[in-house]
């Protein structure tokens, strides 16, 4: 049996022993999904790549703390999400100063779509505070953290049908809140 055919539990056991081929196999299995997760948060391809690679390094170093209560993919995604948020916040601390000679008109060249998107995102996040806590949790897991339905089912220990129903109801609740404003 090749490393590619082995189950993740076996690969993780080999990774804990420092087997680099097993680490490479785990990396190959999860890197696309983790890159996409990081990219959704940091919004820069190079930053997302760095965050993803740092997250894998962290995961391999802290593999002994993986309890197996969730899937390895969910555990790894949590590391990626946390590292992405930290990186995003670091990037937000730096503001671009306009160069000398630029008019105030340059500020107006920002497209209205960008401003509208920012305002809408902030409005949605604010409105999420006003919906039922279970709805807020499930929407955050799905839209903000990027978990799919199966992972949410595991995290919340609910059935797939219940997950779909809750997400549908949460969206509807949020939609109604946004129409009131």
Image: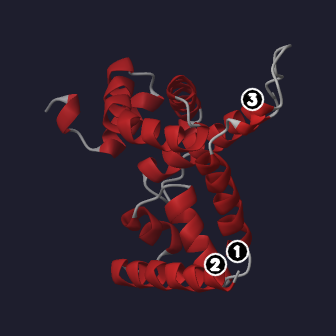
Give above or below for 101 relative to 145: above
Q: Secondary structure at mark 1?
A: helix
Query: Between disc 3 and disc 2, whose residue precedes?
Result: 3
Nearest the eye: 64 or 73: 73
Instruction: Assess disc 1: are there few (<14), some (14-19) or many (≥20) residues with their C-alpha within 10 Å of its C-alpha.
Output: some
Q: Is residue 90 visible?
A: no
The residue at which mark 1 appears reads as: 127
Query: Between disc 1 and disc 3, whose residue precedes?
Result: 3
Look at 43% across and 48% down and name the residue there. 73
Q: CA distance from mark 1 to mark 3?
A: 32 Å
Residue 178: mark = 2
Q: How is the image coloured?
A: secondary structure
Indicate the quadrant containing the N terminus: top left, top right, bottom left or bottom right.
top left
Instruction: Assess disc 3: are there few (<14), some (14-19) or many (≥20) residues with their C-alpha within 10 Å of its C-alpha.
Output: few
Residue 43 relative to residue 4: left or right: right
Look at 44% across and 26% down and name the residue there. 17
The residue at which mark 3 appears reads as: 106
Look at 34% across and 27% down and name the residue there. 22
Q: Are marks 1 and 3 in contact (CB under 8 Å)?
A: no
Residue 24 relative to residue 123: left or right: left
Query: Between disc 2 and disc 1, whose residue precedes?
Result: 1
Q: Are marks 2 and 1 in contact (CB under 8 Å)?
A: yes
Outermost residue, left side:
1
Relative image position of residue 181 (x, y in whole percent) = 71, 80
Q: CA distance from mark 3 to mark 2?
A: 32 Å
Instruction: Assess disc 2: are there few (<14), some (14-19) or many (≥20) residues with their C-alpha within 10 Å of its C-alpha.
Output: some
């Amino acid at each position: 049996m090749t490393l590619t055919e082995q189950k993740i539990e076996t690969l993780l056991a080999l990774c804990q022993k420092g087997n680099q081929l097993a680490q490479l196999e785990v990396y190959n299995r999860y890197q696309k999904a983790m890159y996409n997760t990081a990219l959704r948060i940091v919004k820069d391809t190079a930053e997302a790549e760095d965050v993803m690679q740092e997250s894998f390094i962290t995961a391999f170093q802290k593999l002994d703390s993986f309890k197996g209560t969730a899937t390895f993919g969910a555990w790894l995604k949590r590391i990626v999400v946390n590292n992405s948020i930290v990186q995003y916040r670091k990037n937000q601390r730096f503001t671009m100063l306009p160069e000398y000679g630029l008019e105030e008109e340059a500020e107006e060249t920002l497209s209205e779509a960008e401003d509208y998107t920012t305002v809408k995102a902030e409005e949605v996040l604010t409105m999420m505070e006003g919906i039922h806590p279970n709805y807020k949790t499930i929407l955050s897991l799905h839209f903000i953290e990027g978990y799919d339905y199966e992972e949410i089912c595991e995290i919340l220990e609910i059935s797939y049908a219940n997950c779909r129903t809750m997400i549908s109801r949460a969206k509807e609740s949020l939609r109604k809140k946004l129409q009131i404003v």
